[in-house]
Image: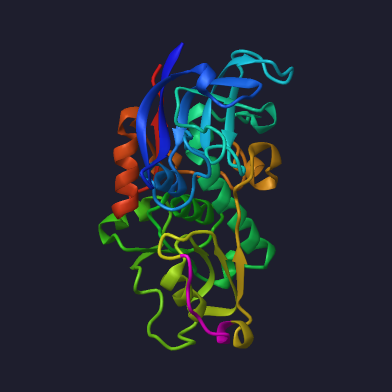
């Protein structure tokens, strides 16, 4: 049986991807073979497909860190042919082991999770790592005492998938969310998913001083770089910033003053957990859960498999709105 996959190669000193046709025996080993139905596109996936950075660690390799579909064959007693399953996250899938961007995926059974009750194959990856990471960040805000009555919550990189879900989840819990974006034309979209106010990415802080006007009770930062510094300088006393992105830069410069004079907390969020290792946040996103996004179908949209490489290039160059979900053939 032959099928198509996007594979990343390291040739002539550079990384590049191309669509290939291969057989099942060309896939990395594993107990579970999945006929792919949907795969998500994260920023790191786009970087891998475009040969940017150091995402993929082995060559050649099929990238993509989230897939859903039906079990086509299994030597594990935990899964049977026809079971609807998903593989998401971890340190190997789509990085050192062939990943999601193939019409078939083969992985160890330990990496495979059943699609939760009430979710279908599309929603499992439409939410996926993006909504889960944002839900983990929201849980941290709550754990550290940032309740809706404390004040405004800022979300940076607002039109991205993770940030869009963060806005949706926070608004559903009663927070007033201020969405920061470099795309003023997307204000209507951001308000439709729950933003109370939309500001430019340069309007987070009112000036360049180490401490500026206290504006935000909490924040979710998906971009890093200068916007993260601007957030820290404008947090209220005992404010909390949850950070998980680097689209605006892998480093940032700030001062000690937000921490020692306003007791601001900067909390790193890592949501790269396989489904089997996820805690309450994943459960709370299921139907009836208090962290369930209300506007998934406004945020997530389908693209064809043939559009994947062009979409990744667009994401890297100029960003896109929301979260793309690749519809696999068949």
Q: Residue at x 69, y 37 (%)?
A: 276
Residue 272 lies, in percent from the top left, at 60, 48
**Residue 254 is inside the magenta segment:** yes
Q: Residue at x 51, y 17 (%)?
A: 24
Q: Relative to 87, does residue 284 appear above or below in the rendering?
A: below
Q: Identify the image's colour scheme: rainbow, by chain, secondary structure or one colour.
A: rainbow
Q: Relative to 330, does residue 9 appear above or below in the rendering?
A: below
Q: Residue furthest right?
A: 77
Q: Residue furthest left?
A: 185
Q: Nearer the viewer, residue 189 or 301?
A: 301
Q: Quadrant of residue 223?
A: bottom left
Residue 107 lies, in percent from the top left, at 61, 27
In the picture, which quadrant includes the C terminus? top left
Image: magenta residue range: 250-258
Horizontal arrangement in the rendering, residue 314 relative to residue 32 (left or right) = left
Q: Residue at x 53, y 51 (%)?
A: 169
The number of numbered discs placed on residues in the rendered structure image is: 0
Q: Residue at x 47, y 35 (%)?
A: 60
Horizontal arrangement in the rendering, residue 244 relative to residue 81 (left or right) = left
Q: Relative to 2, does residue 144 appear above or below in the rendering?
A: below
Q: Nearer the viewer, residue 83 or 52?
A: 52
Main SS category, magenta section: loop
Q: Relative to 227, does residue 56 appear above or below in the rendering?
A: above
Q: Residue furthest top?
A: 1
Residue 247 lies, in percent from the top left, at 42, 59
Horizontal arrangement in the rendering, residue 63 relative to residue 268 (left or right) = left
Residue 260 lies, in percent from the top left, at 63, 86
Horizontal arrangement in the rendering, residue 203 relative to residue 97 (left or right) = left
Q: Quadrant of residue 190?
A: bottom left
């Amino acid at each position: 049986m032959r099928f198509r996959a996007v594979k990343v190669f390291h040739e002539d000193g550079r990384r590049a991807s191309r669509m290939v046709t291969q057989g099942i025996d060309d896939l990395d080993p594993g107990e579970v073979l999945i006929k792919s139905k949907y795969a998500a596109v994260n920023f790191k996936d786009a970087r891998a497909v475009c040969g940017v950075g150091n995402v993929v660690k082995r060559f050649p390799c099929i990238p993509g860190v989230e897939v859903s579909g039906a079990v086509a064959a299994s030597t594990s007693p935990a899964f049977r042919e026809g079971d609807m399953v998903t593989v998401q996250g971890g340190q190997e899938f789509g990085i050192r082991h062939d990943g999601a961007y193939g019409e078939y995926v083969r992985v160890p059974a330990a990496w495979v999770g059943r699609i939760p009750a009430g979710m279908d194959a599309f929603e499992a990856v439409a939410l996926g790592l993006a909504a889960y990471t944002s839900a983990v960040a929201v849980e941290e805000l709550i754990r550290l005492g940032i309740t809706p009555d404390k004040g405004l919550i800022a979300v940076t990189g607002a039109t991205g998938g993770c940030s869009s879900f963060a806005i949706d989840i926070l608004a559903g819990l009663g927070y007033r969310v201020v969405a920061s974006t470099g795309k003023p034309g997307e204000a209507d979209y951001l308000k439709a998913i729950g933003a109370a106010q939309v500001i430019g990415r340069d309007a987070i802080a009112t000036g360049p001083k180490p401490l500026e006007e206290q504006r935000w009770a909490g924040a979710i930062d998906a971009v890093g770089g200068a916007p993260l510094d601007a957030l820290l300088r404008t947090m209220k006393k005992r404010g909390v910033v949850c950070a998980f992105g680097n689209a605006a830069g892998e480093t940032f410069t700030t001062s000690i003053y937000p921490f020692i004079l306003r007791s601001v907390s900067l909390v790193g969020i890592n949501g790269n957990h396989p489904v089997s290792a996820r805690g309450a946040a994943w459960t709370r996103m299921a139907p009836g859960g208090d962290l369930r996004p209300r506007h998934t179908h406004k945020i997530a949209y389908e693209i064809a498999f043939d559009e994947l490489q062009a979409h990744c290039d667009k994401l890297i160059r100029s960003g896109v709105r929301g979260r793309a979900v690749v519809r696999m053939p068949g």
